[in-house]
Amino acid sequence: MNDTLKKSALDYHEFPIPGKLGIAITKPFETAAQLSLAYTPGVAEPVREIQADPENAYRYTAKGNLVAVISNGTAVLGLGDCGALAGKPVMEGKAVLFKKFADIDVFDIEVDAREPKDFIDTVARIAPTFGGINLEDIAAPSCFEIEEKLIERCDIPVFHDDQHGTAIVLCAGLLNALELVGKKIEDARIVCLGAGAAGIASMRLAVDLGARRENMLLVDRKGVIHRDREDFSSLNKEKLEFASAAAAERRSLAGALAGADVFIGVSGPGLMKPEWLMLMAEKPIIFALSNPDPEIRPEDALAVRHDLIMATGRSDYPNQVNNVLCFPFLFRGALDVRARYVNAAMKTAAVRAIAALAREPVPQEVLAAYGQKSLSFGPDYIIPKPLDPRLRDHVAPAVARAAVSSGAARLPYPAHYPA
């Protein structure tokens, strides 16, 4: 980061007041009578109502529109294990996105707990405060256990965005890219470099959408995860889900890429060599999502293959895979039907809603925001832009409808949503 950008970023966070969040009062609070309603003695009445029926908390408190963004700071952006407190600017930033894009209130909570059990216990005990929990920046493999246990213990949606937000947006782009190159997901040979939170979740969601496990190869630092690896018995259960019977010649990344239709990179910068692209099938799809430096830069990839479709995690290239396309609107839909959890049906509904929006004509306000004269569905536009205001009206209803039809919702499909 250059000195000018560094100073601008620090000034933005410090002035005119520190941080990016505040709390607003939502009711009149000007008179003695209003004070008596907001606090004692009037506040006793909603307390009694909630004590009689806990569901009344959604009527008389902010619970129904309040999400906790919670982290222990063990995997902060691309910065690694920064610690809980150092991760707070990111959690505040996440809260700003929730509010800006979906009008959801957020408390950011940084938990100084490295052991999964301690973190799980802490979050489970404060969960009654919230309508949903967004887990963030928690290192793998602990993140899998943490989310799984919290889903079991809480009766509100628990969603690890580094897993599922990435997977949903990635898979939306993947479905569209496959259509553009005339391939089907059930036939596509997929190589995923990176076996952490985003990689595992993306592979799982691709399976839910029709991809076949036998066509998938998952690659970590030691190569393809296969059943004859010396460390096979010590691999975590998430990696074991995708352990293959790959032949010896397909156990390196280069070997895995031979004939592959799709490369998904959620690993680190520069790990995809340009010459390896020549090993892939015709019209390959490249998702190089390491941020800020991708596994391979688009200009380097396009210098080798002119027939590819490419996405990155960066805003200065076409096809940015950005979680903000998903998580505010997924939670909006889940909260509005008072969902108990986020299930596979809700995730795949979000995928298909995001993918479908990319096929719609792009309004002028989006073009203006990105300095574009035109955008249309094609190799350089396979997913919507993050500032597209239509995302809320497409994704939230799709998620709400899926929650209702799959039995995850406590409330019916909202009357104010599209029919």
Image (cartoon, rainbow, N blue to C red):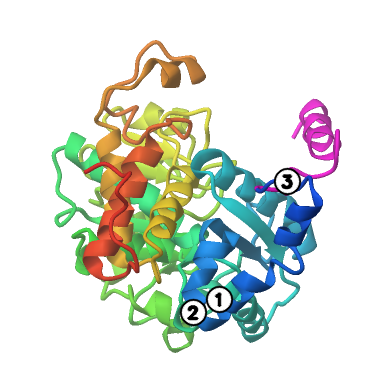
Residue 13 in magenta stretch:
yes
Mark 2 vs 3, N-terminal side: 3
The span picked out in magenta is 1-26
How would you rate the neighbour count of disc 1 (Cα within 10 Å): few for under 14, some for 14-19, many for 20 or more?
Answer: some
Report the residue at 60% width, 70% height from top. 46
Tell me residue 332's x, y (percent): 44, 51
Task: Return the mark for residue 50.
Answer: 1
Q: In which quarter of the image is the N terminus?
A: top right
**Residue at (20, 39) in percent of width and height:** 282
Q: Where is residue 220 in the image (x, y as percent from the top left)?
A: 47, 66
C-alpha span from label 2 to label 3: 32 Å
Where is mark 3, residue-wise? 21
- Say above or below: 208 vs 119: above
Disc 2 is placed on an element classified as loop
Q: Can residue 140 be seen in this view?
A: yes
Proximity of marks 1 and 2: CB atoms separated by less than 8 Å:
yes
Can you identify the residue that label 2 sits on? Answer: 53
